[in-house]
Image (cartoon, grey):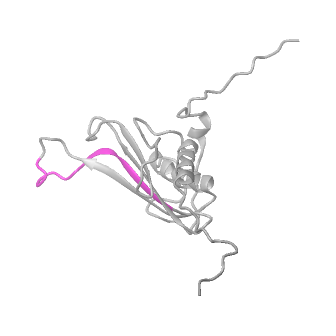
């Protein structure tokens, strides 16, 4: 009897699996967004990525998706006159999502990506949660969407506002 060795999966947190490239994300009609809610053959892959950011983070936070705003970042060549030539070179994207968490609080997440050669900072990815960059929210390349959702979840867990302390058994001051 031959024993097949178990193939260990990579433990590297930013490793993509083949499932990350096969997922298709769909948004329901209640989500306010500026891109199509359904994926179609031939559409921009970054739109599916944007929908995936919203879906995966909503799933990790057990929240309700509220809105998704996708913005293409563009620039021009250094020798081109800004008065004559509009920005036309793709630099990257910025995805802003809003989720309502189970406590009813709104959580705003911004995924910002710039690419070389036209990006001002080269290849860079940044993530902010409610205006604060998490510890793992800055890298050369973005992590997989489920891992990004975990970064957001861990950040919110660490920066959760403290509950009000209500003293028990204290008499009211007269």
Q: How far across and how far down the image is residue 129, in percent?
A: 46, 54
Location of residue 70 (image quadrant): bottom left
Residue 101's place in the image compared with 117, above or below, is below
Q: How far across and how far down the image is residue 19, in percent?
A: 62, 38
Query: For the C terminus, which image quadrant?
Result: bottom right
Name the outermost residue toward the bottom. 174
Query: Which one is nearer the viewer's eye here, 104 or 14?
Result: 104
Q: In this view, does 20 lie to the left or right of 80?
A: right
Q: How far across and how far down the image is residue 133, in percent?
A: 42, 49
The residue shown at (53%, 60%) is 37
Q: How far across and how far down the image is residue 118, in percent?
A: 26, 39
Q: Is residue 96 magenta?
A: yes
Name the outermost residue toward the top. 1
The residue shown at (39%, 35%) is 140
Residue 40 is at least partly visible in this image: no
Query: Which one is nearer the viewer's eye here, 45 or 6?
Result: 6
Query: Which one is nearer the viewer's eye here, 76 or 124?
Result: 124
Q: Is residue 41 magenta?
A: no
Q: Give the range drawn in magenta.
A: 81-98
Residue 165's place in the image compared with 12, above or below, is below
Query: For the N terminus, which image quadrant?
Result: top right
Residue 119 is at least partly visible in this image: yes
Name the outermost residue toward the right. 1
Name the outermost residue toward the front. 174
């Amino acid at each position: 009897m031959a024993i097949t060795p178990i193939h260990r999966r990579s433990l590297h947190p930013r490793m993509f699996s083949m499932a990350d490239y096969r997922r298709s994300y769909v948004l329901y009609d209640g989500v306010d967004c500026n891109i199509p809610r359904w994926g179609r053959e031939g559409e921009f892959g970054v739109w599916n990525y944007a929908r995936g950011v919203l879906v995966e983070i909503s799933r990790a936070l057990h929240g309700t998706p509220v809105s998704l705003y996708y913005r293409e970042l563009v620039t021009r060549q250094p020798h081109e006159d800004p008065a004559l030539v509009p920005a036309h070179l793709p630099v990257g994207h910025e995805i802003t999502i809003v989720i309502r968490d189970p406590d009813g609080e709104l959580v705003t997440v911004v995924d910002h990506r710039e690419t070389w050669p036209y990006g001002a900072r080269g290849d860079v990815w940044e993530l902010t949660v409610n205006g604060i960059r998490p510890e793992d929210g800055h890298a050369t390349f973005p992590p997989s969407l489920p891992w990004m959702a975990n970064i957001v979840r861990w950040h919110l867990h660490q920066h959760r506002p403290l509950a009000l302390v209500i003293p028990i058994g204290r008499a009211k001051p007269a």
